[in-house]
Image (cartoon, helix red, strand yellow):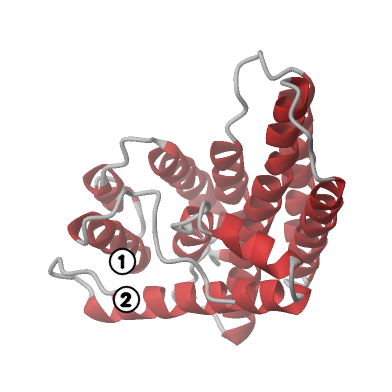
Amino acid sequence: MTSTQPALYPDALSDFEAELRAVQETLAAAIEELGMPLGELVHAQSKQTAPALRAALILAAGYAPHGDEQSRRRRLYLAAALEMLYLALHVHRLLVNAAALEAQGEDLDRSFIGSTILAGDYCFSRAASMAAQTDSPAIVTRFAQALQTVSEGHLRALFAPEATGFDENRALLEAGAEAAPDLAGLPAHLLPGYRAAAAALAATLADSSLNARSLAALLPTLPADYQPRWQALAQWLMGEHTNGQDARRSPAPRS
């Protein structure tokens, strides 16, 4: 997707969008490996997870201006891992909906329940595999912590649906904001300020009234060579709105 807003850093925007497409292609390939009918079930749910805000955060906050190919690969795999984890949660949420229907006396297709469990478990497994492919023990540890957090929140929502809803998107964005700075190649004395900016970015992306201008306001808090990538994210978000789409909708990966 190309933004129709004038880009301050056109090369940065092009590079950001290329990385986002690479993440989406990784996800699409993983879904295709499932085959029919599970792949169809997962693909349908993938439409509900777009746009890839979790990946976008990693691609911005985890960007190292002077990084090498290994740095890029780690960034892409972590971005894909968070998106796949979010997709896994969406698939398993179908079980919550099915349980509610059953409680209302609806007859359920048991094969659908089984397929949903298998599809969700596959997505969880692939998310963990993608995190492992970063070859970074620190990233794998942070991903495991994120998985524990969202799994516990998901279970609370499953067994206590009357309680305050658990915001899986926000939790994953916050987890991404904690992990991404580890990939950014910053000297230690700049990390605290950068982590604060990443946390603010996560809060901005989690806001249902998402405003790209509030994201752009973070730019002056960043080192100069990190600003173009964050500006590219802001431009991408503006493009989402300019194209007449809600900030939480974007073309799904093709399986």
Farthest-out residue, bottom: 69
- Amino acid type shown at disc 2: Ala
Image point 55% across, 48% down: which residue? Answer: 177
Farthest-out residue, left: 6
Q: Splitting the image into 4 quarters, where does residue 181 fall?
A: bottom right
Q: Is any part of residue 86 visible from this angle?
A: yes
Q: Which mark is residue 12?
A: 2
Image point 38% across, 75% down: which residue? Answer: 17
Alpha-carbon span between mark 2 and mark 1 = 6 Å
Image point 62% across, 28% down: which residue? Answer: 166
Q: Which residue is under mark 1?
A: 232
**x then y, percent, for residue 112:** 79, 51
Q: Is any part of residue 66 visible from this angle?
A: no
* Left or right: where 21 falls relative to 134: left
**x then y, percent, for residue 61:** 48, 58
**x then y, percent, for residue 162:** 66, 13
- Amino acid type shown at disc 1: Ala
**x then y, percent, for residue 85:** 69, 54
Contact, mark 2 vs mark 1 (Cβ under 8 Å): yes
Q: Residues within 10 Å of mark 2 (few under 14, many from 20)?
A: some
* Left or right: where 90 falls relative to 20: right
